[in-house]
Image (cartoon, grey):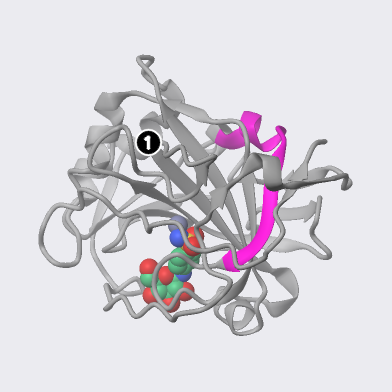
Amino acid sequence: DYFEVEPFDDRFGQKPKENKCKVGRQQSPIDIDTFNTVWKEYPPLHMNGHWNFKHKVLLFNEGHTIMLKEKGGVNRPKITGGPLREQYTFEQLHFHWGPNPSMGSEHTINGQTYAAEAHMVHYQSRYGSYKKAKENKGLLVLGYIFQVSDHFNEELRDFIDPIPLVSRFKNVTFSAPDILKLFKKASNACYYTYTGSLTTGDCAEGVLWILFNQTIPISPQQLSQFRKMYGSNGDTLRSNFRETQRLNGRQVEFVTS
Ligand code: BO1
Ligand code: ZN
């Protein structure tokens, strides 16, 4: 009775769509060439509410990924500080992975690919919604890189256990007060920040990226669970990461706190 499985619906507009990525000069992901970054100091990042979701969460198969949203969407977590000029609100969390543990991350570091990557998508609070903020280049994505490890990551259990339940376009609702705790340690580490795009859908530009430098461990067995999801084309989603894009003169900042 831990899980409450519901049929897939379109309440959140997650209906699978054709991938019609626009071509642009500020696309994501990118390779982070660490020797070519600019060292910057900013005030500390403040993540308010990410580590104690007060409401139920909804985990679902979005067609391209497994996604988590706060059910109801009231009291959403907020983020300020660092390079942010104003407050952003949490919208959703999703994952990218690959066909084997040697690839799956979207961003690469000095050409190195990693096993997986999680994205916490946020919007500028003043726009009141993800959609409005997207139209006004008001999106922020926090990226977390997973590194394959022999060690089973207990903190990933709440994301991975329900995957078989949602693998064929189902929703699952559960109470998980601390479901984002897994990201807490990495969120206090150094990060890279640059301006890029969404990596799926229309690949809209004007997205601020914060990519944390500290990796999160994940076991090969845990990674294999992601590949059991079914994609919108009816096949299992063995891989859902986009290849790295040209930097085109953009500057990547390295921030230590
Ligand atoms: S990501 O964090 O850059 N991978 C990312 C990619 C796409 C979205 C958010 C974050 N958002 C949505 C679009 C929707 C679209 C959907 C498809 O992705 O805004 O309009 O249908 O996955
Ligand atoms: Zn993503």
Q: Is residue 186 magenta?
A: yes
Q: Quadrant of the N terminus?
A: top left
> Residue at (29%, 61%) from the top-left corner?
64
Query: Horizontal placement of 66 versus 99: left or right?
Result: right
Q: Position of residue 148 (x, y in %)?
A: 38, 26
Residue 182 seen in render = yes
Q: Quadrant of residue 151?
A: top left
Ligand 1's quadrant is bottom left
Q: Position of residue 152 (x, y in %)?
A: 36, 18
- Magenta span includes 99: no
Picture quadrant of residue 189: top right
Q: Quadrant of residue 147?
A: top left
Q: Mark 1: which secondary structure?
A: loop
Q: Is residue 74 left or right of residue 37?
A: left
Tell me which amino acid carries mark 1.
Ala
Q: Residue at x 23, y 34 (%)?
A: 224
Image spot of residue 139 (x, y percent): 63, 69
The reply, left or right, for residue 186 in relation to residue 43 is left
Q: Quick one: 244 or 161, which is closer to the camera? A: 244
- Is 79 left or right of 209, judged from the image as shown? right
User: What's drawn in magenta, residue-wise?
Assistant: 183-196
The one of 190 and 166 positioned closer to us in this rendering: 190
Label 1: how many Cα within 10 Å (few below 14, some 14–19, many 20+): many
**Residue farthest top in this picture:** 151
In this rendering, the answer to whether 40 lies above or below 129 is above
Q: Which residue has dot 1 on it?
A: 115
Quadrant assignment for the C terminus = top right
